[in-house]
């Protein structure tokens, strides 16, 4: 029966092993041997005698003979593997060593290349220094430790001790072969299974060579950085516009604010900042089919020979060193990229991850507007001529005959401080305002003429004079009509007040109308009504007050007459002589404040008071 690798490390629930070692050193499976001590087996780990337990209740397994709990050694499986591997290595005396390469700052050194290596012999050692190696291979006076990984890798402490001993050591990973038969993994152990170096004494020398080369490179790098730093002359944006063809074209296209931008690395170009940036914009906007990339922009500058050869091929590493020294530096490619990125932040270009740059709608609209501005003067001049010709077409021929458009167009308008030709260059709002003013001259002359009306240099003087004369005549007529209306309104108010007074106060009306009245501002009611509508309203209010007073007086007189009549009847009932009763009514009495009963009596209460003064019985005196 064949033994699988995993069975070397497996055990039963009772702790027994499945693999043992024969007296001849051959590994045996529990299924290959007879029961009991007849198996004639020993433990691979401690080499003590084993008993094969193959009953009907428990799983078949090996256990140590004459041991109380019967458990096997914990290291038996590992020892069995080591013995098996040692036997394979001792038979063939060769093994594939893994490659080892050390790297440092993009530099690499091959410590050893992957290859088959022959050895003199293989041994198992119980201890080598402070460690117990799995297997040791010997080649003359050199040793190679071979460790095996099945369940766990070599622990850090053991690796550290191997490194301290400075002995070569590799680890072969057999964890993926646990289900393979031992007879199938011999070549895997020797040649194919994954393996790695735990320690290689030659690694130290390789790293020393890397370090030496790194120092040389660092020195060379410092020299190059200093060379570029000292030779670089940064270019700042110019404070005044330049005369370069590309810059002029960009400014003409309304792109002045998109050039002359500060960029690190601008000193890598031999022309002004605004000029090379304008050339990039020109290349970006050119109607070409291939996508526009950063390299296309740089190529456009290179083709114009604007790229300083000193910085054409500088590496990114050296460029970073120059920049780290405090110099505002970028290699040409990065300077161009930084400029395009600046335009992207401003919203005038867009990019994608493949560094393809596209002009935005905002940029295209800006250029279209600039083109429209360039065509604007001719277009507006034509519009202006047409408008003026339409305006003066209705004027009398003798008044328009002396007008010359070209002369008017170039003349400064006194009240405006600019010529019509200057207005052609105005922004849209000012231009629209100017043409509206021209278009409204005739309307203003017709509906609101005035002496100092701005005629904007057009021959409207005669039309304005006629309009002013007509305005004066209309004003005089309005004043006459207004005065007539005032008189009519005054007469109407006076007549209305008089009619109201006659209706409300009758015969007292004429006297009340002309009498001074405090309610009408110390004037007579008829004067107040004559002055204004408000005075008429005050007079009407005063009339209502007077009417109410007369009504009150009339009612009081009626009450008095009634009370006096009743008192007279009462007096006659108390005197036998009517003449005596009349004398009592008219006689003054101290009780009544010196008034007679006839004077004192004005209502029921005063009637009762006077009645109390009459004799209680009918009297002759």
Image: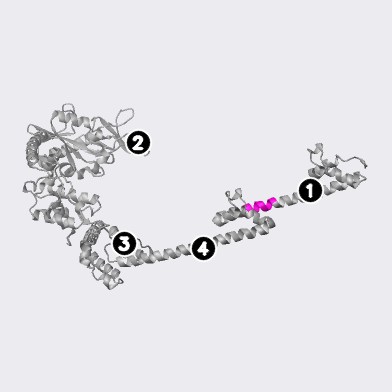
Residue 514 drawn at (x, y percent) = 62, 54
Q: Which SS class for mark 4?
A: helix
Q: State the extent of the magenta-drawn residues as a range.
A: 542-549
The residue indicated by pointer 3 is 437
Find residue 356 and report its image quarter. bottom left
Q: Which SS class for mark 1?
A: helix
The residue indicated by pointer 1 is 560
Q: Which SS class for mark 3?
A: helix
Quarter containing the N terminus: top left
The residue indicated by pointer 2 is 13
Other-residue count near label 4 (Cα within 10 Å), few / some / many at <14 / 14–19 / ≥20: few
Colouring of the image: one colour
Residue for point 18% across, 49% down: 339
Q: CA distance from mark 3 to mark 4?
A: 38 Å
Residue for point 30% across, 65% down: 461
Q: Kindly report which numbered mark, 3 or 4, lies closer to the viewer in this rendering.
A: 4
Find residue 410 and report its image quarter. bottom left
The residue indicated by pointer 4 is 485
């Amino acid at each position: 029966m064949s033994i699988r690798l995993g069975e070397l490390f497996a055990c039963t629930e009772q702790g027994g092993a499945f693999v043992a070692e024969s007296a001849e050193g051959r590994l045996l499976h529990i299924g290959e041997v007879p029961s009991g001590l007849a198996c004639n087996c020993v433990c691979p780990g401690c080499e003590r005698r084993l008993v094969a337990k193959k009953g009907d209740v428990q799983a078949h397994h090996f256990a140590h003979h004459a041991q109380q709990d019967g458990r096997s050694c914990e290291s038996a499986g590992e020892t069995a593997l080591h013995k098996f591997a040692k036997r394979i290595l001792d038979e063939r005396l060769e093994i594939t060593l893994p490659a080892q390469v050390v790297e440092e700052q993009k530099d690499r050194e091959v410590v050893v290349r992957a290859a088959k290596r022959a050895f003199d012999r293989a041994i198992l050692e119980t201890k080598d220094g402070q460690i117990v190696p799995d297997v040791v291979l010997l080649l003359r006076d050199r040793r190679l430790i071979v460790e095996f990984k099945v369940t766990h890798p070599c622990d850090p402490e053991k690796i550290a001790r191997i490194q301290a001993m400075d002995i070569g050591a590799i680890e072969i990973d057999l964890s993926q072969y646990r289900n393979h038969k031992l007879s199938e993994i011999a070549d895997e152990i020797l040649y194919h299974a994954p393996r790695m170096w735990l320690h290689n004494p030659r690694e130290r020398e390789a790293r020393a060579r890397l370090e030496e080369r790194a120092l040389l490179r660092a020195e060379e790098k410092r020299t190059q950085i200093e060379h570029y730093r000292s030779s670089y002359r940064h270019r700042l944006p110019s404070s005044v516009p330049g005369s370069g063809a590309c810059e002029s074209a960009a400014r003409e296209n309304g792109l002045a604010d998109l050039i002359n931008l500060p960029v690190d690395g601008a000193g890598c170009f031999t022309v002004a900042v605004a000029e090379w940036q304008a050339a990039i914009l020109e290349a970006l906007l050119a109607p070409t089919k291939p996508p526009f990339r950063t390299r296309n922009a740089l190529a456009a500058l290179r083709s114009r020979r604007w790229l300083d050869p000193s910085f054409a091929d500088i590496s990114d590493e050296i460029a970073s060193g120059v920049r780290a020294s405090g110099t505002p530096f970028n290699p040409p490619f990065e300077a161009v990229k930084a400029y395009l990125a600046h335009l992207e932040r401003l919203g005038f270009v867009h990019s994608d991850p493949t560094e393809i740059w596209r002009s935005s709608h905002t940029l295209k609209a800006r250029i279209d507007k600039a083109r429209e501005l360039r065509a604007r003067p001719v277009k507006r001049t034509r519009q202006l001529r047409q408008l003026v010709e339409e305006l003066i077409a209705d004027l009398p021929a003798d008044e328009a005959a002396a007008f010359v458009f070209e002369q008017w167009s170039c003349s400064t308008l006194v009240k405006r401080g600019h010529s019509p030709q200057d207005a052609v260059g105005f922004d849209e709002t000012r231009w629209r305002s100017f043409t509206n003013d021209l278009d409204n001259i005739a309307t203003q002359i017709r509906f609101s003429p005035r002496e100092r009306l701005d005629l904007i240099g057009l021959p409207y003087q005669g039309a304005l004079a006629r309009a002013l004369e007509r305005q004066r005549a209309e004003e005089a007529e309005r004043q006459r009509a207004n005065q007539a209306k005032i008189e009519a309104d005054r007469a109407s108010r006076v007549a209305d007040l008089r009619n109201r007074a006659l209706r409300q106060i009758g015969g007292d009306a004429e006297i009340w109308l002309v009498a001074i009245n405090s309610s009408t501002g110390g004037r007579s009611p008829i004067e107040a009504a004559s002055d204004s509508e408000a005075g008429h309203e005050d007079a009407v209010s005063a009339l209502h007050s007077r009417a109410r007073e007369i009504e009150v007086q009339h009612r009081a007189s009626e009450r008095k007459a009634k009370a006096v009549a009743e008192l007279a009847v009462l007096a006659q009932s108390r005197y036998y002589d009517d003449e005596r009763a009349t004398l009592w009514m008219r006689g003054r009495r101290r009780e009544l404040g010196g008034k007679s009963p006839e004077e004192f009596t004005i209502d029921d209460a005063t009637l009762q008071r006077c009645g109390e003064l009459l004799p209680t019985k009918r009297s002759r005196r």
